[in-house]
């Protein structure tokens, strides 16, 4: 079994130093709880509601920044995935996610589907969401809005992902009383359609008038939410057998990938 811990945090907009400590403490707490894989929110290092590109640039980090070494030191034998505002070698800004283990940054993914005003600040990534082979499983990394594109999540499953991880910032949208947030329903459907576990880590609080859903959810391969946080800061913890993601068979004669009609679509 693999223990997945999602840490729903409330980062401070623009305060990279404060967020550095917040992230390090959250990773350490998750590791103390037995985490093999730790997931934190989108743009955890910087906050989300930037006024403009200049403000985002002031809070952006290169993957070589020494802060990543501090986070790596907290990881131990686990793997951590979290969002950061990336300053690329090309001088452009990216809404990115880093995969970090005790040795440092293992991989960086740049969000390819930018949401709303992100398009005024960030450059979309040019590479497909990677499947990173770690000591705790094959992890596909994407960011927030990427989850809404079935082409992306199906490709991850075809590429051998055992777990789809997504740092997210889900703004509150109206929904009927008692219903899951729409984004959680998408995560559930993604897991069920692809028979792959999904861990989406949202954020908490209100930032510059924007309320967040607090919809952190860990979903098993059958599409059921097995851990969540709800409103506020907290951790979702679930033990999942990621090897179950390797088989797409539901019954003797049903295989979710083999049954595709690639001759038709």
Image: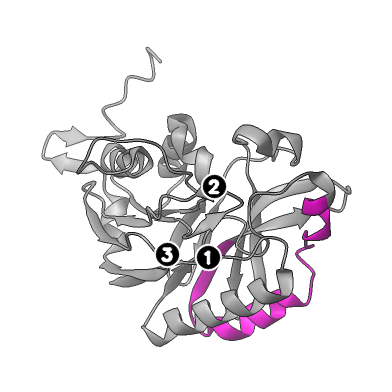
Q: Residues within 10 Å of mark 1 (few under 14, many from 20)?
A: many
Residue corresponding to mark 3: 137
Residue positioned 28% across, 68% down in the render: 238
User: Quarter of the image containing the C terminus?
Assistant: top left
Residue corresponding to mark 1: 10
Relative to 187, is 226 on the left or the right?
left
Task: Say which element carries label 2.
Answer: strand
Marks 1 and 2, how far apart at CA: 12 Å
Determine which quarter of the picture holds residue 126. Answer: top right
User: Mark 1 or mark 2, which is nearer to you?
Assistant: 2
- Residue 211, percent from left and from top: 48, 49
Residue lying at the far top of the rendered structure: 264
Task: Say which element carries label 3.
Answer: strand
Residue corresponding to mark 2: 210
User: In the rendered structure, which disc, 2 or 3, sits on the residue that comes first in sequence?
Assistant: 3
Magenta part of the chain: 55-82
Task: Say which element carries label 1.
Answer: loop
- Residue 124, percent from left and from top: 70, 37
Tell whether position 75 is magenta: yes
Cβ atoms at labels 2 and 3 below 8 Å apart: no
Residue positioned 71% across, 49% down in the render: 50
């Amino acid at each position: 079994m693999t223990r997945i811990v999602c840490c729903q945090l409330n980062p401070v907009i623009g305060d990279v130093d404060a967020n550095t400590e917040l992230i390090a403490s959250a990773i350490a707490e998750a590791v103390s709880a037995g985490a093999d894989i730790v997931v934190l929110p989108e743009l955890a290092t910087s906050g989300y509601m930037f006024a403009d590109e200049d403000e985002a640039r002031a809070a952006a980090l290169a993957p070589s920044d020494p802060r990543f070494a501090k986070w790596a030191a907290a990881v131990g034998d686990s793997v951590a995935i979290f969002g950061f505002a990336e300053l690329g070698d090309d001088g452009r800004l990216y809404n990115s996610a880093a995969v970090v283990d005790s040795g440092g940054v293992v991989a960086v993914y740049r969000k390819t589907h930018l949401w709303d005003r992100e398009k005024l600040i960030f450059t979309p990534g040019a590479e497909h969401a990677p499947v990173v082979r770690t000591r705790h499983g094959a992890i596909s990394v994407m960011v927030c809005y990427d989850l809404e594109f079935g082409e992306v999540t199906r490709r991850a499953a075809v590429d051998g992902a055992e777990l789809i991880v997504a740092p997210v910032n889900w703004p509150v949208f109206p929904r009927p009383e008692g219903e899951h947030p729409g984004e959680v329903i998408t995560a559930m459907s993604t897991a069920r359609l692809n028979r792959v576990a999904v861990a989406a880590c949202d954020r908490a609080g209100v930032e510059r008038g924007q309320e967040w859903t607090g919809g952190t959810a860990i979903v098993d391969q059958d599409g059921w939410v097995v851990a969540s946080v709800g409103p506020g800061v907290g951790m979702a913890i679930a033990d999942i057998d990621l090897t179950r993601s390797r088989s797409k068979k539901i019954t003797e004669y049903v295989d979710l990938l083999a049954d595709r009609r690639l001759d038709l679509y």
